[in-house]
Amino acid sequence: MNVYLGDSGLAGDCGGRREGGGREGRKKQGGDCKLLGSQRMHGGPACPSVSPSPPSSPLFLAKWQLRLPSLLRLHRGPHRTRPPFFPRSPILEKKKKATPPPPPPPPIKIVTRARRDPQTLPHAGKVGTLESTRRLKEGEGASRMFRNQYDTDVTTWSPQGRLFQVEYAMEAVKQGSACVGLRSSTHAVLAAANKPASELSSYQRKVFRVAEHAGVALAGLTADGRVLSRFLRNECINHSFVYEAPLPISRLALRLADKAQRSWKRPYGVGLLVAGLDETGAHLYYNCPSGNYFEYQAFAIGSRSQAAKTFLERRFEGYNDYTPEQLIKDALSAIKETLQGEKLTSANCTVAIVGRKDDGTIEPFQMIDATRIQEIIDSMEAAEEAPPAEPSSMQEEERTSDAAPMDI
Amino acid sequence: MSRRGDWVYENNGGTCVAIAGADYCVVAADTRLSVGYSILTRDHSKICDLADKCVLASSGFQGDIKALHKNLAARELLYQHQHNKRMSCPAMAQLLSNTLYYKRFFPYYAFNVLGGLDSEGKGCVFTYDAVGSYERTGYSAQGTGSTLIMPVLDNQLKSPSPLLLPARDAVTPLSESEAVDLVKDVFASATERDIYTGDKLEIVVINKAGTTREYIELRKD
């Protein structure tokens, strides 16, 4: 028997890592192959080294069964979990028939927490690969994504018709801190929760002015978001240079979505809430890393955004008639929902507004001053503590026409 | 006068003047647009507000002037996005110079005067030729009436030469209203003798409080 080819006739060196294997796989299967270092041989082609005992000896079988770490593991019989790459030699096949096939390996224990319904998992109906699981940290509950052989490249489809890299990019959005957007027929408001990365650092800027009439709030990889903001700014400037008119928001969202269609680049790992004012009124769009975009009356993205979305779902129907003040209050309340108990102050949120005032003049996109935000928060809290009053009775003075300067 | 077959420019006439004060700047231009011996319109502004403390007045070929103003306005917006503040007048002055020289071999037919407040709040005026050579002065006039106006300003404002040492402030000691009156007088005189200057005078005053605009009637012949 050719020790290099092994029984199965499969040539080549140690097959390397098990499909979808990772650290867990290695641990479960015992130590690394000392000869080949980190490359494990999980029943792959034969290891090109001399076996201490011939493959057919009962001693070898016993060892293999007990899974003691050994210098090498020779493959016996057909690979249980992966189809063979090379055609088998008929001579070797005959030899194999004499010996009984080895028993299947004991199933790998998977430690589970909240288990999602398998049908909804990305690889429901998977091809027969042995998968290990990799728990992703997520803001809302533990959930699992299976790694598989279709997720390495953004240009690879899975048999179920999914592009996993794009879906993973959308996961990145869920890792960012929360952003909220809402609009009435004349005004659009964006708000973001400011979460510093550490106690020593300051928070990342999440709300960017893109043009006088539009701005974006982003969640996810803020570096990608900055690049996209710069792109959007250029697009707006070029459009108004050529057409002497502001770029309509739907077309702005479209340009952004088109940018996601570059097949040679990794997807942008940032979700953008694009808010602005054009001839047809105020608009709010959400742009996914996938290139999809939708128009919304109100939306929230980022970690713990579900709480904000629930809040907005209860109230969005009246938004078209809201005054700018009311919109800002609702945006702040939605951000408060995402903070989950932490006190809302002007230091941990950013709010920006754009719109057309009653007299027809444009209120350009700008961040609202921190002191003004604090006033609004205080009035909201005062209203909560006070006995239930009509929303109109606690109406403050309308936003003064001297809009707050842009906050840095 | 016969022009070359490939002459792509035309001179639409007009005059621009700017005077810098200790804490203000006056930029003025007439509003007549002409071609040859005809008037195209009596109501065309040659002044462009580039930044809150920076105003550009240009005379020459209006097609190039419009394009130049748009170009600079777009660049200023980009600057605003990147630096989170508006462009200062000296920065804009350099940008304008670079933009003009960029087209050294197919120039903008524009004679520019840039006026505003510098970062310290003092008035500044920058004067240009068609290809971007510029200088900070206390006052300047450009355009068809400049040869009539400049000697009068020299006489009245006595700007020290930049070659004199020690370097002295180029700004005039006149007050704001005196400077505006001077500009009105100077334009009235230029209108008398220059056919391309007249109709209306647009005066923009930039100071700490902001920008104000004023329109004065001039002779319409």
Image (spheres, rainbow, N blue to C red):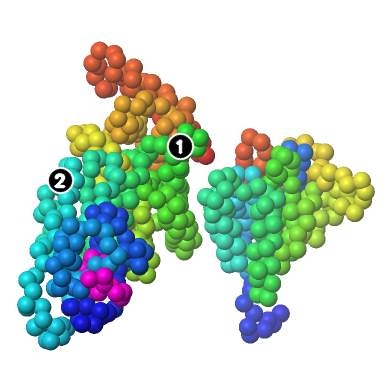
The residue wearing badge 1 is A198
Q: Residue furthest top?
A: A387
Stretch in magenta: A40-53
Amino acid type of the residue that numbered disc 2 sits on in the rendered structure: Arg
- Residue A172 visible to an observer of this rendering: yes
Q: What's the CA distance linking mark 2 and mark 1?
A: 31 Å
Quarter holding residue A374: top left
Badge 2 crowding class, 10 Å Cα cut-off, few under 14, some 14 to 19, many 20 or more, is few
Badge number at residue A234? none
Left or right: A397 in relation to A135: right
Q: Which residue lies furthest to the right in this view?
A: B165
Whether B3 is drawn above or below B144: the answer is below
Q: Which residue is rendered at x = 67% and y = 63% of the image? A: B98
Image coordinates of residue A350 in percent, x first then y, are 42, 36
Whether A130 is drawn above or below A15: the answer is above
Is the stretch drawn in magenta largely helix, strand or loop? loop
Left or right: A80 in relation to B10: left
Whether A242 is drawn above or below A140: the answer is below
Amino acid type of the residue that numbered disc 1 sits on in the rendered structure: Ser
Whether B33 is drawn above or below B156: the answer is below
Q: What element carries label 2?
A: loop
The residue wearing badge 2 is A115
Left or right: B29 in relation to A354: right
Front position in the image: A19 or A65: A65
Q: Mark 2 lies on which chain?
A: A
Label 2 or label 1, whichever lies nearer to me, is 2
- Mark found first going from the N terminus, 2 or 1: 2
> Are the residues tagged 2 and 1 within 8 Å (C-beta)?
no
Confirm whether the magenta stretch covers residue A16: no
Image coordinates of residue A251 in percent, x first then y, are 34, 58
